[in-house]
Structure formats: structure tokens, C-alpha cells
Amino acid sequence: MSVDSSPTHPVLVFDVYINGGNRKVWLLDFNPYCRTTDSLLFAWEEIVSALHSQSPHPAPISGTPQFRVIDSHLAASSSTAPAYATNRLPRDAIDLSSGASIDEFAQRFRRQMSEATRD
């Protein structure tokens, strides 16, 4: 997949789910960088510092992107969660749940993921 950034949104952020069993990566959420995007595993101070460094005109970020991984349920529940991360789902997924409870939505999501992996 290739995505070109635009002058209005030169920095993009995304969330992925990595399935260890069959080594697939699922793109869950994709947004322009802005304060209303949940930072989850990164503190906003880290992000702003990395983007703006000491220069008034920072160089484009290059090289390998930095990944942070939640490797246990305990680690996920002990992190400080931003406003929209209370269910550990992207805000878009919550909005698309059509009023279903999180359990109903999760079951539907798992069923669709299972069907997609069979194809």
C-alpha cells in the first residue's frame, strides 16, 4: 500500500493489529496527525518534540517508523488511556458500531475477520 501525504497533512498516523498466528497485519485506523487523534502508546510531548525538534523548520521524518507494542492484556489495561481509547478500539470503529454493545460489535468483528481470513 502506498499513501502520499499532502501539504495540508504531511504527517499521517495509523493503528495496526498484528496477528502472530498467521503473521498478517491489519490496518485498523488511519488519520492525519492532529491533537484530536489519540496518541495511545506515545505521549503528546514525545510526538511534538520529535516533529518540531529544535529547528523552526524541521526536516521530514525519515527512516524506519517507531513501533510500540502492547504485549499483554495487563499492559493494555494499565496504560493511561486518552478520551476515545476506553474500549481499546479506534474511535471510527466505535462510531460504526451502530449502537450495538461493545460485546455485540466485537463478536460481529471477529466473525467478519474470520470470514476474511478464509478467503
Image (spheres, rainbow, N blue to C red):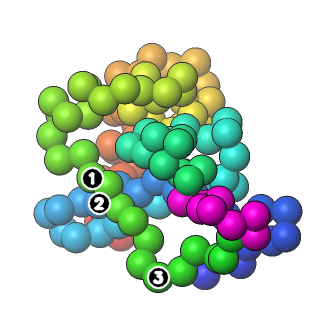
Question: Is residue 42 visible in this depiction of the protein?
Answer: yes
The three-letter amino acid code for the residue at tag 2 is Ile
Which residue is labeled 2 in the image?
18
Question: Residue 31's spot in the image, x, y percent?
Answer: 65, 53
Question: Cα distance, mark 1 to mark 3?
Answer: 19 Å
Sequence-wise, the earlier of marks 2 and 1 is: 2
SS under mark 1: loop
In the rendered image, residue 88 lying in the magenta stretch gets the answer: no
Q: Position of residue 86 (x, y in %)?
A: 43, 22
Contact, CB < 8 Å: mark 2 with mark 1? yes
Magenta segment's dominant SS is loop
Q: Secondary structure at mark 2?
A: strand
Task: Give the x, y percent position of residue 105.
Answer: 43, 29
Residue 108 in the figure: left or right of residue 99: left
What residue is shown with label 3?
Answer: 63
Q: Residue furthest front?
A: 54
* Residue type, mark 1 in image: Val
Q: Quadrant of the C terminus?
A: bottom left
Q: Nearer the viewer, residue 114 or 55?
A: 55
Q: Which residues are magenta?
A: 50-57
Q: Quadrant of residue 79?
A: top left
The residue wearing badge 1 is 69
Q: Residues within 10 Å of mark 1 (few under 14, many from 20)?
A: few
Observer-side mark, 2 or 1, equals 1
